């Protein structure tokens, strides 16, 4: 039984081995780009609006509302990042029910990369709000002695995000494989539904955790900056 797409080599280019993790990551990204281009090519700023645009705008409004409820902040700055994160994880997980497709989120390298993206989003949003110099000064607030603890806290949350997504995806895959091995003619349809449900759930949970992490980091940065300015 293959535990990780990192163990599967799809093809080689000279000495370079392209694993299933890389191959299916590229495939998911290409699929998202093509679908996005098709969906958005006929958008209009004035009526009449097509049904596709109405559905798309309703979906975007729903996502904005979810972001607002999670972050308690203006959701618009977070929409591109959170939406891209959610769609990539969702498509990767849902396509995992397709025979032969190895979900890239089943690799610790992929989940680690996603967690690093979330980790880097915190200073990115902080710099966009405060400017580079003022943002870097917040790591020294309220005292320079807090610098190692601040950095350690952000790194530990990044590792926790990566391990959580990896563990969720792998546990679902392991349970499905065990049940299929025990009763292959009884459980396949159930496992398909199981995989779809948990694929959507894991994408939602990870995105919410990422939003909480980024928004709380941004709020904490502004709090430290305000405290430093007040002091």
Image (spheres, rainbow, N blue to C red):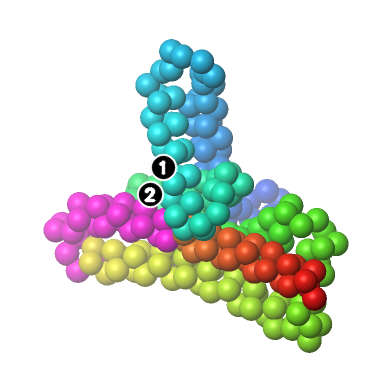
- The residue mark sitting in front, 2 or 1, is 1
Q: Residue furthest bottom?
A: 145
User: How far across and down, in percent of the image, does residue 94 sit?
Assistant: 38, 49
| Callout 2 crowding tier (Cα within 10 Å): few <14, some 14–19, many ≥20 | many
Residue 15, can we see it?
Answer: no
Q: Residue at x 80, y 56 (%)?
A: 131
Report the residue marked by disc 2.
94
Q: Residue at x 20, y 52 (%)?
A: 189
User: How far across and down, in percent of the image, does residue 125 sit?
Assistant: 68, 55
Q: Residue at x 26, y 52 (%)?
A: 192
Q: Is residue 187 magenta?
A: yes
Q: Is residue 195 left or right of residue 187?
A: right
- Most foreground residue, 134 or 118: 134
In magenta, the rendered stretch is: 181-205
Total marks placed = 2
Q: Is residue 49 magenta?
A: no
Residue 33: which numbered mark, if any?
A: none
Q: Residue furthest left?
A: 186
């Amino acid at each position: 039984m293959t535990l990780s797409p990192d163990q599967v080599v799809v093809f080689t280019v000279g000495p370079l081995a392209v694993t299933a993790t890389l191959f299916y990551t590229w495939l998911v990204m290409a699929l998202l780009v093509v679908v996005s281009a098709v969906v958005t090519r006929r958008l209009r700023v004035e009526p009449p609006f097509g049904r596709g645009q109405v559905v798309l705008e309703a979906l975007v409004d729903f996502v904005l509302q979810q972001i607002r409820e999670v972050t308690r902040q203006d959701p618009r700055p977070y929409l591109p990042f959170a939406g891209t994160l959610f769609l990539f994880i969702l498509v990767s997980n849902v396509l995992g029910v397709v025979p032969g497709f190895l979900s890239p989120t089943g690799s610790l390298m992929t989940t680690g990369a996603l967690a690093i993206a979330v980790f880097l989003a915190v200073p990115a949003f902080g710099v966009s709000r405060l400017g580079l110099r003022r943002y870097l000064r917040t790591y020294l607030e309220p005292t320079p002695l807090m610098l190692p603890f601040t950095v350690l806290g952000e790194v530990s949350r990044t590792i926790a995000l990566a391990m959580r997504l990896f563990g969720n995806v792998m546990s679902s895959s392991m349970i499905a494989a065990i049940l299929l091995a025990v009763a292959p003619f009884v459980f396949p349809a159930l496992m398909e539904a199981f995989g779809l449900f948990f694929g959507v759930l894991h994408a939602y949970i990870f995105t919410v955790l990422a939003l909480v992490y980024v928004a709380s980091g941004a709020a904490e940065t502004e709090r430290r900056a305000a405290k430093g300015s007040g002091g």
